[in-house]
Image (cartoon, coloured by chain):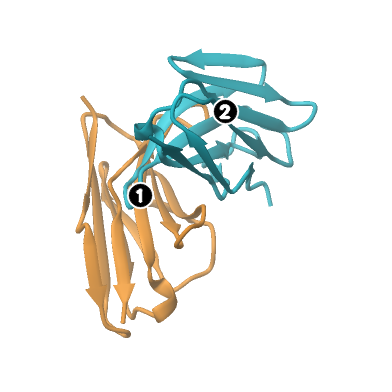
Chain colours: A orange, B cyan
Amino acid sequence: SQTIHQWPATLVQPVGSPLSLECTVEGTSNPNLYWYRQAAGRGLQLLFYSVGIGQISSEVPQNLSASRPQDRQFILSSKKLLLSDSGFYLCAWSVGTGGYGYTFGSGTRLTVV
Amino acid sequence: SQQGEEDPQALSIQEGENATMNCSYKTSINNLQWYRQNSGRGLVHLILIRSNEREKHSGRLRVTLDTSKKSSSLLITASRAADTASYFCATDAPAGANNLFFGTGTRLTVIP
């Protein structure tokens, strides 16, 4: 069966430090992969999506970047964190485009101090 | 923006009552989805309704879609305390887009 792993669950980082969040999917091939951010009590904002290895689309200008070095691995990074990068980060995968439900990871709570 | 908007933002009901949440969106869609999120957790997919469908059921869930009004509703019947969560609608607009646009959610509290 398909599963998605996201880690770490919580992270406290100082301003200016780097960031690397990792997401891996098991049990499927060539998934669409997504990074979302959720501010407290708010909806989800799409940050990046990928339809294949090395293919990254960014939805909003920001201090973050994403990479997909392997088919089922999606990494969210930053060279220097800002206070405004704090939030709840969610990785998700889907089959195809739009016509299927997304499966979400359990999320990473990032606090930049 | 295509982002959906849920209404109400918060809903509090007694166990056993029905809960209705609404979602409105702005442009054409291929499908609309509803998700549930327990506090501090990832989202769980509940149900997907396609633009050519008007109603769909899954257990105690009933979803309706009115494309002429660009709106959808999620009905949870005979609510339970375990239904307490935030509920989000998501659309794939513009139709066929590579991603989903989520609303801001309805926070449902079911009081035992």
On the image, numbered disc 1 is attached to which residue?
Answer: B39
Asked if residue B29 lies left or right of residue A90, the reply is: right
Rendered view: A15 above or below B59: below
Rendered view: B7 above or below A61: above
Q: Quadrant of residue B54?
A: top right
Asked if residue A2 lies left or right of residue B35, the reply is: left
Asked if residue A34 lies left or right of residue B101, the reply is: left
Q: Position of residue A59 (x, y in %)?
A: 53, 57
On the image, numbered disc 2 is attached to which residue?
Answer: B74
Residue type at tag 1: Ser
Which residue is depicted at the point 39% across and 65% down?
Answer: A87
Which residue is depicted at the point 53% across and 68% down?
Answer: A61
Which residue is depicted at the point 44% across and 76% down?
Answer: A84
Q: Position of residue B9 (x, y in %)?
A: 59, 48
Chain where mark 2 sits: B
Q: Secondary structure at mark 2?
A: strand
